[in-house]
Amino acid sequence: MEVKMKNYTITVNGKSYEVTVEERGGASAPVTTTSAPVAPVVKAAPASSGSEGRVKVVAPMSGKILGVKVSVGQAVKKGEVVAVLEAMKMENDIVALEDGTIASINVNVGDSVETNQTLVTIN
């Protein structure tokens, strides 16, 4: 019986693992796996980031960023949507907490965020 080894890198919850899979001869042959952590996956910095502002707009819950509705330097009014967060299969509008100018954008579309993670800052 021929034994083949294949290596894969698998990412689970943002953490990458190097996995070796041992394949054995028939379709019903058992498969064994071993895994070891590898270097973390580094995401690119948000495309539109500026210096940190004095007011932080944070994620109210964990989820995924579906949209960023502002850009650095843009004037916003209190209650204006700055980002859209998907959580529990619902889209949630994240709004500016006060009037001001967007100082930084700390997330990209598609990012997973945690509760209280800073999404944008306002001056």
Image (cartoon, rainbow, N blue to C red):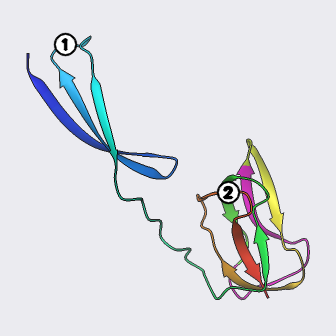
The 10 Å Cα crowd at callout 2, few under 14, some 14 to 19, many 20 or more, is some
Residue at horizontal 52 percent and vertical 74 percent from the top:
45
Q: Secondary structure at mark 1?
A: loop
Q: Label 1: few (<14), some or many (≥20) within 10 Å?
A: few
Q: Which residues are magenta?
A: 71-86
Q: Is residue 86 above or below residue 75?
A: above
In the image, what residue type sits under mark 2?
A: Glu
Residue 2 left/right relative to 29:
left
Q: Quadrant of residue 90?
A: top right
The picture places residue 71, in percent across and down from the top left corner, at 69, 80
The picture quadrant where one finds residue 116 is bottom right
Looking at numbered disc 1 in the image, what kind of residue is underneath it? Answer: Gly
Give 89 or 24, whichever is nearer the viewer: 24
Residue highlighted by disc 2: 114
Tell me which numbered mark, 1 or 2, is placed earlier along the sequence: 1
- Seen at 77% across and 51% down, the residue is 91
Q: Which residue is mark 1?
A: 26
The residue tagged with tag 2: helix, strand or loop? loop
The nearer-to-camera label among 1 and 2 is 2
Q: Nearer the viewer, residue 97 or 117?
A: 117
Indicate the quadrant containing the C terminus: top left, top right, bottom left or bottom right: bottom right
In the rendered image of this protein, does residue 65 appear above or below residue 119? above
Q: Is residue 91 left or right of residue 112?
A: right
Q: Quadrant of the N terminus?
A: top left
